[in-house]
Image (spheres, rainbow, N blue to C red):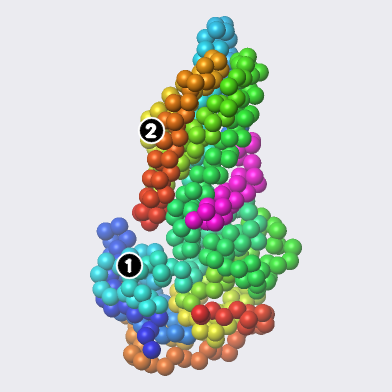
Amino acid sequence: MEPVVHLRGTVALLGRFPALAGIDLDVLRGEIVLLRGPNGAGKTTLLRVLAGLVPPVRGEARVLGHNLPAEARAVRRRVGLLGHATALFEELTAAGNVGFWGRACRASQDDIEAALGLVGLDGRLRDVPVARLSAGQRRRSALACLLARRPELWLLDEPHAGLDNDARDLLDGLVHQAVAQGATVVLSSHELDRAQALAHREVGLAGGITTGPAPAAGAESPEAKTLGADVPESMAEVPYVA
Amino acid sequence: MWRDAALVAGRDLRVEARSRVTLQQVGPFALLVLILFAFALDPARQTLERATPGLYWVTVLFSALLALARSAALDEADGVRDALRLSALEPAGVFAGKALAVAAELLALEVVLGIGVIILYGAEPAGIGLLVVTCVSATAAIATTGTLYGALVSGLRVRETLLPLLLLPVLAPVLLGATRAFEAALGGAPAEGWPWCGLLAAFAVLYSVAGAAAYGTLLEGS
């Protein structure tokens, strides 16, 4: 089975600086992989390369069966990136934002409503402008935008930041649910206790290169861990893989 | 593409409707410019009447700079550009949607300014058909050109000051054409105005095509 992510000697530049200086990484379908490393190690850049947003300039890079950077557009439509920025419009409501980004990714109205429900924004918060939401509620809105597009590869950059414990449990549960349905997850986090409990394995990064072990080719995809939180049943009706 | 354009235009107009920047800042700014021109030229009433078409379009152009800067800033914020690149939206659709939203705001503003020049400058509307076609084609030209240049300067630290510097010289033919067409309409010789309308329409088509073709590259490069 072809890995969802296959990188060999991948180099990516930020300006002239080699933020990634030769990454080797394989991620199999259904895996949850934690990227570990100090600030500036290249975790965010690696996630952006996998999203097709930063072009690799050297080495081999295949994501979801597409070569990067040549087929970046095909990759972008199948991944979901939850980064530091939320990409929310302050003036629009939570539902307005999720509706816009959902439709921008060809999601149906049912998917959009389901996503809002899954993150708990289907009640009174639904019609509140984002400018009046707390940081955690904004993160929930951004998570709903990601859920609505039903990505095959989740790319989570510090996903627990800004969330309260309930929201963290919810996020972990949603990640496990997505993986159980065939999605793959690569995340970076400095909150190691929670991230290590969520991940199947860890990959170390330092100075733009991988320092941890890469998976053996052809290794079996691990089983999803037990859910860390109650997840609404409607999630099971939303398959993540075509 | 048109579905994407409608989606983006709807978003931009909803944001504007809720923020009320156009209503509370761009509109009053435009009226203020009209009033200042009236104060400056009031002692020479004949000059004011003769200069009405030019003053009207200079005011529209200055106001358009504010609306265009605002439109470009919407996609600058907090990861929006990355989200656009990750979406399934056609870049040409995003361009068309943003230009449509700016055009809708400018057309509403032009109606208000039209009333303003009738009251303040004593202009007497004539050649309504030519006036309407001029407004629509000049607005399309300003909106498409401004949206393209807005994308061109996005990501630069000096974009707020660079946008007018780049845009105003490029829009000089639009100012000229719209002013001449208005002069013809208000002067009771509309036949002389239609060729200028043709120039405006050609300008709008040129920049619509260029913007639709280049927007994807600009989105990637910024």
Task: Write the start and end of the magenta stretch as one range.
Answer: B1-24
Secondary structure under the numbered disc 1 in the rendered image: loop
Determine which quarter of the picture holds residue B210: top left
List the residue tagged with mark 2: B170
Residue B187 is left or right of residue A69, and the answer is: right
Question: Could you tell me residue A222's position as x and y percent?
Answer: 47, 91
Q: Is residue A116 above or below residue B42?
A: below
List the residue tagged with mark 1: A69
- Spatial separation of the CA atoms under disc 2 and disc 1: 35 Å
Secondary structure under the numbered disc 2 in the rendered image: helix
Q: Is residue A224 above or below residue B187?
A: below
Residue B79, visible in the rendered structure: no
- Same subunit, labels 2 and 1: the answer reads no
Is A107 within the magenta?
no
Q: Residue furthest front?
A: B191
Looking at the rendered structure, the kind of residue marked 2 is Val
Magenta stretch, main secondary structure class: helix
Crowd tier of the residue under label 1, counting other residues whose Cα lies within 10 Å: few below 14, some 14–19, many 20 or above: many
Identify the residue at image location x=28%, y=78%.
A8
Is B17 within the magenta?
yes
